[in-house]
Image (cartoon, helix red, strand yellow):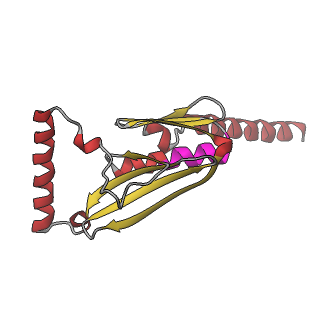
């Protein structure tokens, strides 16, 4: 009887320790996308357009939403509202034609992006990283804006800030 109890206990212990060590090897998807532990009590993002840092206890909301702008582009946006004077907006934009794969308009939009990339390389500017504003409609006082270049990076940023805020543990996010 004692041997049977000991054997069952050891088997249970072994299974638990194998499961726990397997869990240690699993890296959250956000961490694979440029997210890592950061200074306690803060969430920060380092992007091509600059650097943003906020105290976790000052964040009042985190949101993500999409909207159509001027019937031409889809804006996928993450906002971080903090107690204080500024709202942080992180967004990825894509032509509305991207939602309609395989048509001539999509091919034209892709060709336009290629031409823009070549022109910015020749001019030595980084236009694709710049925030897009149309004065006065999109000029918002007390708004900090960053343009993200891929939907995957925006998803990872949202996961990072949400994780930091929910857990109360500092995180650092970076993307190109």
- At 10% from the left and 60% from the top, the residue drawn is 108
Please tell me whether residue 149 belongs to the stretch shown in magenta.
Answer: no
- Answer with left or right where residue 109 lies relative to residue 67: left
Query: How far across and down, in percent of the image, does residue 158 sit?
Result: 49, 50
Number of residue marks: 0
- Answer with left or right where residue 131 lies relative to residue 123: right
Please tell me whether residue 165 belongs to the stretch shown in magenta.
Answer: yes
- At 45% from the left and 62% from the top, the residue drawn is 65
Q: Nearer the viewer, residue 99 or 11?
A: 99
For the stretch drawn in magenta, the main secondary structure is helix
- Answer with left or right where residue 119 lies relative to residue 68: left
Q: Where, quadrant-wise, is the C terminus in this rendering?
A: top left
Instruction: Note whether 103 is above or below 162 in the view shown.
Output: below
Q: Nearer the viewer, residue 63 or 142?
A: 142
- Answer with left or right where residue 163 lies relative to residue 99: right
- At 16% from the left and 50% from the top, the residue drawn is 113
Query: How far across and down, in percent of the image, does residue 120 sit?
Result: 15, 39
Q: Where, quadrant-wise, is the N terminus in this rendering?
A: top right
Query: How far across and down, in percent of the image, does residue 111 sit?
Result: 10, 53
As drawn, the residue found furthest toward the right would be: 2
The magenta stretch is 158-168
- At 9% from the left and 67% from the top, the residue drawn is 104
């Amino acid at each position: 009887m004692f041997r049977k109890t000991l054997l069952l206990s050891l088997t249970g212990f072994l299974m638990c320790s194998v499961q726990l060590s397997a869990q240690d090897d699993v890296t959250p998807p956000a961490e694979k996308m440029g997210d890592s532990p950061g200074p306690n009590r803060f969430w920060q993002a380092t992007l091509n357009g600059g650097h943003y840092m906020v105290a976790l206890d000052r964040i009042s909301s985190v949101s993500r939403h999409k909207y159509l702008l001027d019937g031409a582009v889809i804006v996928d946006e993450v906002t971080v509202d903090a107690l204080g004077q500024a709202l942080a907006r992180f967004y990825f934009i894509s032509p509305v034609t991207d939602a309609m794969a395989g048509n001539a308009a999509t091919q034209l939009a892709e060709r336009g992006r290629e031409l823009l990339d070549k022109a910015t390389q020749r001019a030595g500017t980084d236009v694709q990283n710049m925030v897009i504003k149309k004065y006065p409609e999109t000029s918002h006082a007390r708004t900090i804006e960053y343009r993200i270049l891929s939907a995957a990076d925006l998803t990872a940023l949202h996961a990072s800030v949400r994780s930091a805020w929910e857990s109360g543990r500092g995180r650092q996010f970076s993307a190109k």
